[in-house]
Image: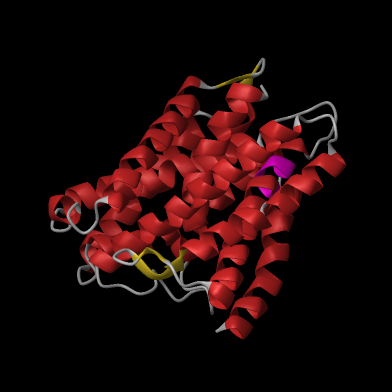
Amino acid sequence: MLKQRIITAIWLIPLVLGAIYLLPVEYFAWALIAVFLIAAKEWGRIIDSQCNVTQWSFTCTVGILLIALNLIVPADTIWLRGQIHPIYFAVVTIGALWWMVSLLLVLTYPKSAKLWQKNPMLKSMFGQLTLVPCFVALIALKSISSQISPYYGASLVLLVMLIVWAADSGAYFVGKAVGKTKLMPAVSPAKTLEGLLGGLVTTLIVVAGVMVISPEQELGLVVAVTLFVALISALGDLSESMFKRAACIKDSGTILPGHGGVLDRIDSLTAALPVFTLIYIAFWM
């Protein structure tokens, strides 16, 4: 399993970095729809693992929403005079609020499942709240321009990814090595408190990198934001695990050997990106 994960990462990471840094934001926004359609199809299995009609219906719904967003708010008009477009701000804010609700659902699982487990409409709504704000936040960050660097927005996207990757990797290896205290066994039996703490410590490597590249940043703020985003990313992981467990699904898909599906790969980012985007708007815009 670890070997497969490494092999997949070797070809996947350059592909992701190339798209982030080399694709103009207008093309990036349209190309990203294909990725999110795969994730939507995988979420359709969470809604109803047996009904293809339900799965494709949800996929089409998400596709229509994303295409409409790209048409109504072209990527090069998201930021005007340093202000984010109201539609994008509303979607990102709704996304962040959704993660507050998701936290309650995760903390009270399996009791909370009685409210939504047999309700396809609610699970469809939860899927839209998970995927659409993530898409919007990703495009919003990528489209930020700066006189300092033409790759400023792309670097912000990479920063969030590095925080998530560091947290995930630290949690995985520390959890494997010394993990004993179950974090939330009803949601994800393999995750441990030691792993979570290890992941948070690992993200401090990202903090060190930020301070080396941009020493004018306030250290305390960078540390606080990094740790908070890492914690939120863990919520994204736990939330997807909760929905998969309720649907009796181990992996959302098989498209990425060793990693499962696209949804398995971006679950942490679905929470981290909207929250980081709001924080950025509040403290750095």
Residue name at image x 54 percent, y 79 percent? 258
Looking at this view, is 98 or 254 the one in front? 98
Q: Give the range drawn in magenta.
A: 154-158
Residue 61 in sight in this render = no
Query: In the rendering, at what x and y percent does residue 183 appear?
Result: 41, 62
Residue 156 in sight in this render = yes
User: How many labels sit on residues?
Assistant: 0
Asked if residue 237 is among those painted magenta in the image, a careful observer would answer no
258 vs 12: above or below = below
Query: In the rendering, at what x and y percent does residue 172 appear?
Result: 56, 70
Query: In the rendering, at what x and y percent does residue 187 appear?
Result: 32, 63
Looking at this view, is 275 or 265 the one in front? 275
Looking at this view, is 280 or 75 the one in front? 280
Q: In which quarter of the image is residue 139?
A: top right
Q: In this view, does 107 lie to the left or right of 141?
A: left
Q: Is residue 220 left or right of residue 258?
A: right
Instruction: Please say which color scheme the image uses.
Output: secondary structure
Query: In the rendering, at what x and y percent does residue 50 appear?
Result: 20, 72
